Image: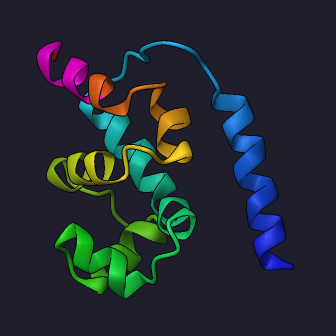
Amino acid sequence: MFLTFLTTNIMIDLEEKSEVGLVQMNQSDIKEEISAKMKLIRIENNYTQEQMATVLGISKKSLVQIEKRRINANWTITIATCALFRNSEIIRHALGGDALKTLESAVHHT
């Protein structure tokens, strides 16, 4: 039941963010967006918190803090998340079609 609720929320959110083309965002916006979606990205990829933390090179405690919105991921973790999970529908819709181009644009236009 929780998974169905979560899936429904993901789809609603994805529909609201669905856009074609490059989304212009700054580094702070991107960190905020990816941090807010971290748990959904993890669940989308069927990772436990321990597995996701290992993949991102952070502690499980740090991941939990990001997922609970106590802290935002730093820029390095944000880039790693976007690169490693670049095929994620959640990331694509949060940052526009090509997340890596959005990241690159944020770096070169700040």
Question: In front: 93, or 45?
Answer: 45
Q: Quadrant of the N terminus?
A: bottom right
19 relative to 37 in the view: left or right: right
Q: Give the residue at the far right of this rendering.
A: 1
Q: Main secondary structure of the magenta part?
A: helix
Q: Quadrant of residue 66?
A: bottom left
Residue 108: within the magenta? yes
| Place of residue 40 in the rendered image (x, y in percent of width and height, measured from the top left) | 56, 61
Q: Is residue 1 left or right of residue 74?
A: right
- Location of residue 110 (image quadrant): top left
Position of 58 with respect to 17 (left or right) is left
Quadrant position of residue 107: top left
Is residue 90 placed above or below 29 in the rendered structure? below
Q: Is residue 45 above or below residue 26?
A: below
Q: Is residue 30 above or below residue 104?
A: below
Which region shows up in magenta? 103-109
| Front position in the image: 25 or 1 | 1
Note whether 79 is above or below 72 in the view shown: above
Residue under the image location 35 percent in, 87 percent down: 50
Measuring 26% from the left and 29% from the top, which residue is drawn there? Answer: 103
- Tell which of 103 and 61 is nearer to you: 103
> Which percent across, then down, holds residue 12?
78, 43
Residue at 15 percent of width and 51 percent of height: 76
Which x, y percent locates residue 54? 24, 79
